[in-house]
């Protein structure tokens, strides 16, 4: 694995996310250990690993829902750290989908999706509604636009969450176990939307245990363990051999199910 | 199709009647003590004239001291609630802040108010307010003959202009006092919003102000409103203590009426009934509103 200097991601517009020697502690507990990682334009990276290995922490460092203490993170050519104004700009280029949907319960589906465009880029209601309906259409839920989140099923809510993230026209999408909180029969409707998104060339970083999805969609698989990136290889390499012992054990465990 | 089971009618049982009977006996005994042992000379109409009296000249009923008192009490509660809610909103937000200094300031405020007897607190602040703050902001110098000050709008909102600075001092004292309780209500409301809501709002790139305005406060307010309504009623009752700093609200005027008429029992029973009607009406109203808004949210 090659370590690209942090400066490369500033000059190379094809690199959307770069981690350069990133470490993070929760009090005395080190959750991330010297992470180095690059995500290029159009790449689909699947992140997997046992529970507690730091997958969420790493992906949340990208848009600084968690702050790192050492190392440098660049996103879309900007270093993310501290400066709130810069951070807001980065977050508008990075969509995020959470395990627990986190829709805004006091707003209708349409309002959930229009909020960011209206506030952040000062679109008029009409323009924002048009964009929102376009994305709701794409996740096939436009007919529910006037309902409230609590009236939708988990799968539907997660699709709305994807539309909400897309409405800011992000360059990168982050997914943190988007299907883990769903009933089994709803997993596919969400994965289908994500696959479609990948087919359209969206740059994606996906934490998931859905190895079927990884096989189908990923360009690269990152395997994490105990806060380290243990494997970072092409999908084919990962699934056909070239992986370490820990990844082997992990994979055999989750493929049993 | 099966019929729903018939709900048993709620009936009073023998035990209930015994309880009622016991309460009745106690009341009867109290009345007996007052009438036969104290040989108390009841005179309700004398005191009732201080609520409302019939003016022979104009042939009209005119509200008297006690009704004016309850109007002042209402005005006090109204303004004090507005100011206290503002204090509570800011302080409550500071209570949940990441900034240590902000947390310490708001924590000190809450603990100070909660651990000093209300009367002592009111005395301290009243003498500070009336001695220092009021002259500073020039409340005493309002034009007592200005058009607005003499208008009925001013009277409805603030009462007698001659007592304006007295009124403001009382309202501020109450507001500072109740603000601490509202601070805790607001804090609980904000903390009831899950972490995921903050994160989702930040993740779409909202500014910190918009996160609060669009996501956190609208949700917190639904949690806050019912206890806030309760606090308003508490405030009406608590407002009686500002009688000690000579704010001319219901309790203050009641002491005057009691001493002029020497009809202590009648005065305080009437005043108690007035507070009860006021507070119970608000409680019923807020109860209805809450139920309605619950239904509106299906
Ligand atoms: N807010 C937090 N405070 C303290 N420890 C945390 C916090 N968030 C995560 N951790 C710890 O960091 C480690 C990595 O967590 P996480 O990134 O959520 O793992 P994963 O997503 O791979 O399951 C875990 O051991 C977890 O207990
Ligand atoms: Mg996780």
Image: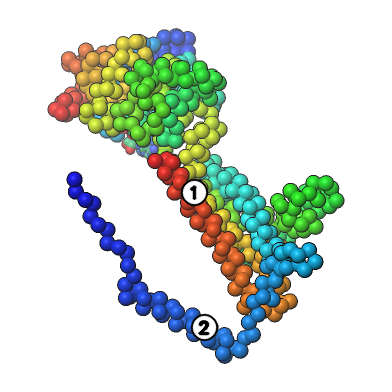
* Residue A109 pos. (x, y %): 41, 28
Relative to B14, residue B33 above or below: below
Coordinates of residue B154 in the picture (x, y in percent): 75, 50
Frontmost residue, B98 versus A197: A197
* B250 vs B190: above or below: below
In the displayed structure image, the side of residue B104 where residue A242 appears, left or right: left
**Left-right relation of B160 to A5:** right
- The residue depicted at 68 percent of the width and 67 percent of the height is B51
- Secondary structure under tag 2 reads helix
Mark 2: few, some, or many residues within 10 Å (few <14, many ≥20)? few
In terms of image quarters, where does ligand 1 lie? top left
Residue B105: image tag: none
Judging by the rendered image, the residue that carries numbered circle 1 is: B289
Question: Which residue is rendered at x = 73% and y = 76% of the image?
Answer: B260
Q: Looking at the picture, does residue A32 appear above or below residue B51?
A: above
Q: Residue furthest front?
A: B59
Residue A66 can be seen, yes or no: no
Same subunit: marks 2 and 1? yes
Q: Could you tell me which residue is drawn at 54 percent across and 19 percent down?
A: A123
The answer to which of marks 2 and 1 sits earlier in the sequence is 2
Residue B229 appears at what percent x and percent y?
53, 52
Q: Nearer the viewer, residue A131 or B186?
A: A131
State whether label 1 is within 8 Å of ligand 1: no
């Amino acid at each position: 694995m090659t370590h690209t200097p942090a400066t490369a991601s500033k000059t190379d517009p094809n690199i959307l996310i770069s981690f350069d020697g990133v470490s993070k502690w929760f009090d005395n507990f080190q959750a991330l250990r010297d992470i180095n990682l690059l995500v290029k334009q159009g790449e689909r990276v699947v992140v997997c690993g046992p529970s507690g290995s730091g997958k969420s922490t790493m992906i949340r460092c990208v848009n600084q829902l968690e702050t790192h203490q050492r190392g440098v993170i660049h996103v879309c050519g900007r270093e993310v750290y501290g400066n709130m104004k810069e951070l807001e700009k980065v977050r508008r280029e990075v969509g995020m989908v959470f395990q627990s949907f986190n829709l805004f319960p006091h707003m209708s589906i349409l309002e959930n999706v229009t909020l960011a465009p209206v506030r952040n880029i000062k679109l008029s209601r009409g323009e924002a509604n048009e964009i929102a309906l376009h994305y709701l259409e794409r996740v096939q839920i436009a007919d529910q636009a006037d309902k409230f989140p609590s009236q939708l099923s988990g799968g539907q809510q997660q699709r709305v969450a994807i539309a909400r993230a897309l409405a800011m026209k992000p360059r990168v999408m982050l997914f943190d176990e988007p299907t883990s909180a769903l009933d089994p029969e709803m997993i596919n409707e969400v994965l289908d939307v994500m696959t479609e998104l990948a087919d359209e060339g969206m740059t994606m970083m996906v934490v998931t245990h859905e190895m079927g999805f990884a096989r189908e969609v990923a360009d690269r698989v990152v395997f994490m363990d105990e806060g380290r990136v243990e494997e970072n290889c092409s999908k084919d390499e990962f699934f056909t051999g070239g992986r370490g012992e820990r990844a082997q054990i992990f994979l055999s465990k989750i493929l049993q199910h | 199709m099966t019929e729903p089971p018939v709900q048993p009618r709620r009936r009073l049982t023998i035990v209930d009647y015994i309880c009622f009977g016991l309460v009745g006996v106690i009341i009867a005994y109290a009345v007996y003590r007052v009438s036969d042992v104290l040989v108390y000379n009841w005179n309700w109409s004398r005191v009732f004239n201080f609520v409302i009296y019939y003016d022979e000249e104009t042939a009209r009923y005119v509200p008297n001291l006690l009704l004016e008192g309850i109007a002042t009490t209402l005005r006090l509660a109204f303004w004090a609630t507005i100011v206290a809610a503002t204090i509570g909103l800011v302080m409550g937000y500071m209570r949940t802040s990441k900034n240590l200094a902000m947390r310490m300031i708001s924590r000190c405020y809450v603990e100070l108010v909660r651990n000093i007897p209300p009367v002592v607190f009111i005395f301290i602040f009243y003498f500070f307010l009336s001695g220092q703050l009021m002259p500073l902001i020039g409340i005493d110098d309002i034009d007592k003959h200005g058009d607005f000050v003499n208008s009925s709008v001013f009277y409805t909102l603030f009462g007698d202009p001659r007592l304006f600075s007295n009124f403001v001092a009382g309202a501020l004292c109450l507001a500072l006092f109740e603000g601490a309780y509202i601070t805790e209500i607001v804090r609980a409301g904000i903390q009831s919003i899950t972490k995921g809501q903050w994160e989702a709002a930040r993740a779409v790139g909202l500014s910190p102000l918009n996160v609060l305005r669009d996501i956190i406060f609208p949700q917190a307010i639904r949690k806050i409103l019912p206890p806030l309504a309760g606090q308003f009623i508490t405030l009406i009752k608590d407002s009686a203590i500002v009688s000690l700093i000579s704010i001319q609200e219901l309790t203050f005027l009641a002491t005057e009426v009691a001493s002029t008429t020497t009809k202590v029992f009648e005065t305080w029973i009437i005043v108690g009934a007035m507070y009860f009607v006021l507070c119970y009406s608000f409680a019923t109203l807020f109860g209805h509103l809450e139920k309605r808004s619950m239904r509106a949210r299906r």
